[in-house]
Image (cartoon, rainbow, N blue to C red):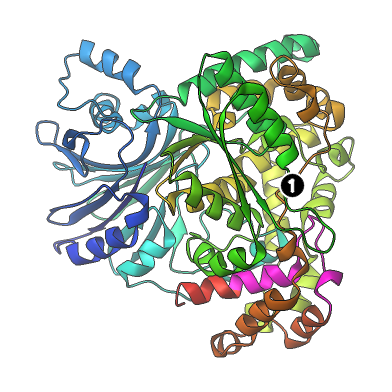
């Protein structure tokens, strides 16, 4: 797990090495163990290293192989790198390290842009071909590892984080109105290639982008989900699917134990993280490190779920660390948590993951986490509403979207209006894609391959890496997801959601964590915004920079300030926190 960056130019000019160094320095937290910058004329790559696999200097990046004529920078982990190394060795390749980085390098030499199809893992990488001058940018199937880029004046810059690109300079920081539409409508989900800034884009998941020496660009999507099912799939029993899912999850969890350092688990006490702990215990893991976090109650709402995480920790005898955050401490660290975001993300989970990661990083460098289970196995409350829907798009929007298009126009200043409802148009286009006919499948496909990428997965990466912590997500193993996509939606929606996963869990973990009400990461102080929290957001939205930017109508802000708790979104979020978070993030990046 690391941070990557670079610049390449078209024509006869040379790359700006100083710019790459600035980007690499900004990402120090992603890779505190080493920094490297390599320049070959018009191409410069930078890297920050967090040593997880091959702790020696031989795994240092940027990694070059003069014989193959390739230079590589890579962020992530290839879980099947040992098997691929054996295959490549049989073909005559010789290795100078024991790293997964070198396996990518040799794989690219052997299979070219077909190589990512062979990888099990999470990854974002860039490859420079010395002879042809081509540069390829690649991102994993679910966008678990981020990759941002900017192109202007015949130069392309890329980095693992948006703030790193800003540190490099030469970025158009004007507000992207399409992205703002998504942020305000789709609960801060901004799908690729957009970001909130016009000058920064992000490479879509499962995409290989090729730049030739003259700046011509070609994209290839190397993996796409399908929800098509055979007759046999439709007729399988719940018990058969249960056993297949359990077997697939066992494999996925086992794959993510590959490391040259210990691996722990972020334990919320929900069925997803509890299953990870249970399966690792089943494999014979002793003294497994687990971690959970809770916050101070507010407005009568509890701020932790320790009763369930404690139950699992005790049941399996894990080495458990329980972290309680008082309200004053949370507020103290909010500015840093916001600054650590690669993009503005409104979920309350952000501060939770930021402070949890801070504590976990004192003990361990790699953890497994339960993100993705709800999207893959049908755990959210809007999926049942899709069953038999006459208008699947309307049903989805009614359950998920924070605002109608008309409401958004009433809340935003006219300078930031779009000509159409961009979020609605995106959902309509995605639902119309072939490969999924069931409305539930359409929603699951959208959430797994778009919403998940640009909300939960991005959130976890931003805040774990802010503390040099690598998070692995077994529910997003692509083979497990391909299996889950074949399961008829009736099995997923059983038992009030995630039915087939809950049935698998009954063979592993105590029933108390399976039959509990569905929990959400509780941070009540940010939902109700009283006292000093209200003062904080009012100050941000009333500042000179906010007034000059003029994103929001003042009348709307006055309503929010007067009664914050009266303006709660469908997903239990605060409208005031949503608009304040955006402004605070922009200020934190000095935009």
54 horizontally vs 443: left or right:
left
Residue 137 locus on image (x, y percent):
35, 45
The answer to whether any part of residue 419 appears in the image is no
Left/right placement of residue 166 relative to residue 301 reads: left
- Of 344 and 423, the residue lying toward us: 344
Q: Which residue is mark 1?
A: 520
Q: Quadrant of residue 536?
A: bottom right
Position in image of residue 107 (x %, y %): 28, 26
Q: Nearer the viewer, residue 394 or 364?
A: 364
| 478 with respect to 573 (left or right) | left
Q: Residue at 57%, 18% (x, y): give it.
A: 281
Start and end of the magenta stretch?
563-582
* Residue under the image location 66 percent in, 12 percent down: 244
Compared with 184, 263 (above or below) is above
The vertical placement of 432 against 476, above or below, is below
Quarter holding residue 484 = top right
* Residue found farthest to the left: 67
Inspect the magenta stretch and tell me whether residue 577 lies in it: yes
Query: Circle 1 sits in a helix, a strand or a loop, which is it?
Result: loop
Question: Can you see residue 424?
Answer: yes
Q: Quadrant of the N terminus?
A: top left
Number of numbered labels in the structure image: 1
Please provide percent x and percent y for residue 488. 77, 22
Q: Residue placed at 66% from the left, 64% from the top?
A: 327
Residue 460 position (above or below residue 115): below
Horizontal and vertical percent position of residue 125: 34, 42
Judge whether residue 390 is colored magenta: no
At 17% across and 57% down in the image, what residue appears? 42
Other-residue count near label 1 (Cα within 10 Å), few / some / many at <14 / 14–19 / ≥20: some
């Amino acid at each position: 797990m690391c941070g990557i960056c670079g610049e390449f130019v078209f024509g006869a000019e040379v790359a700006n090495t100083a710019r790459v160094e600035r980007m690499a320095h900004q990402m120090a937290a992603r890779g505190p163990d080493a920094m490297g910058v390599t320049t070959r004329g018009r191409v410069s790559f930078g890297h920050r290293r967090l040593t997880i696999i091959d702790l020696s200097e031989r795994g240092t990046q940027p990694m070059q192989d003069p014989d193959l004529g390739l230079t590589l920078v890579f962020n992530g982990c290839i879980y099947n790198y040992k098997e691929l190394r054996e295959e490549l060795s049989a073909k005559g390749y010789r290795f100078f390290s024991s790293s997964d980085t070198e396996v990518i390098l040799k794989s690219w030499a052997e299979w070219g842009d077909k190589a990512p199809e062979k990888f099990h893992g999470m990854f974002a990488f860039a490859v420079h071909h010395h002879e042809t001058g081509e540069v390829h940018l690649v991102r994993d199937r679910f966008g678990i590892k981020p990759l941002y880029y900017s192109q202007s004046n015949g130069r392309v810059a890329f980095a693992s984080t948006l703030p790193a690109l800003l540190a490099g300079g030469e970025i158009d920081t004007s507000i992207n109105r399409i992205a703002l539409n998504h942020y305000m409508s789709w609960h801060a989900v901004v799908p690729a290639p957009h970001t909130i800034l016009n000058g920064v884009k992000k490479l879509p998941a499962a995409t290989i982008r090729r730049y030739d020496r003259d700046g011509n660009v070609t994209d290839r999507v190397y993996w796409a989900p399908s929800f098509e099912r055979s007759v046999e799939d439709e007729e399988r029993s719940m018990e058969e699917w249960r056993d297949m899912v359990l077997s697939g999850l066992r494999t996925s969890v086992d794959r993510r134990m590959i490391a040259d350092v210990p691996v722990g688990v972020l334990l919320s006490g929900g069925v997803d993280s509890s299953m990870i702990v249970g399966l690792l215990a089943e494999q014979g893991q002793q003294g497994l490190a687990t971690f959970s976090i809770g916050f101070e109650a507010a407005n009568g709402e509890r701020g932790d779920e320790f009763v369930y995480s404690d139950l699992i920790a005790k049941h399996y005898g894990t080495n458990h660390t329980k972290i309680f955050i008082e309200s004053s401490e949370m507020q103290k660290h909010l500015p840093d948590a916001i600054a650590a975001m690669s993009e503005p993300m409104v979920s309350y989970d952000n501060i939770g993951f930021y402070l949890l990661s801070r504590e976990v990083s004192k003990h361990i460098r790699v953890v497994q986490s339960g993100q993705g289970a709800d999207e893959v196995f049908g755990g959210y409350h809007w999926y049942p509403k899709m069953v038999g829907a006459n208008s699947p798009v309307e049903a989805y929007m009614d359950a998920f979207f924070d605002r109608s298009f008309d409401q958004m126009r009433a809340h935003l200043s006219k300078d930031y209006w779009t000509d159409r409802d961009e979020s609605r148009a995106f959902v309509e286009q995605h639902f119309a894609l072939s490969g999924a006919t069931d409305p539930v499948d359409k929603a699951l496909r959208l959430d797994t391959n778009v919403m998940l990428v640009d909300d939960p997965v991005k959130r976890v990466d931003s805040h774990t890496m802010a503390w040099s912590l690598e998070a692995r997500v077994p529910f997003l193993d692509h083979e497990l997801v391909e299996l889950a996509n074949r399961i008829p939606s009736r099995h997923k929606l059983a038992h009030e959601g995630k039915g087939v996963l809950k049935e698998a869990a009954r063979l592993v973990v105590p029933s108390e964590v399976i039959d509990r009400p569905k929990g959400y990461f509780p941070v009540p102080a940010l939902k109700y915004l009283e006292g000093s929290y209200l003062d904080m957001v009012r100050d941000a939205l009333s500042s000179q920079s906010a007034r000059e930017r003029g994103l929001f109508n003042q009348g709307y802000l006055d309503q929010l300030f007067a009664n914050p708790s009266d303006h709660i979104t469908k997903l239990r979020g605060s409208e005031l926190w949503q608009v304040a978070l955006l402004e605070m993030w922009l200020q934190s990046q000095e935009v």
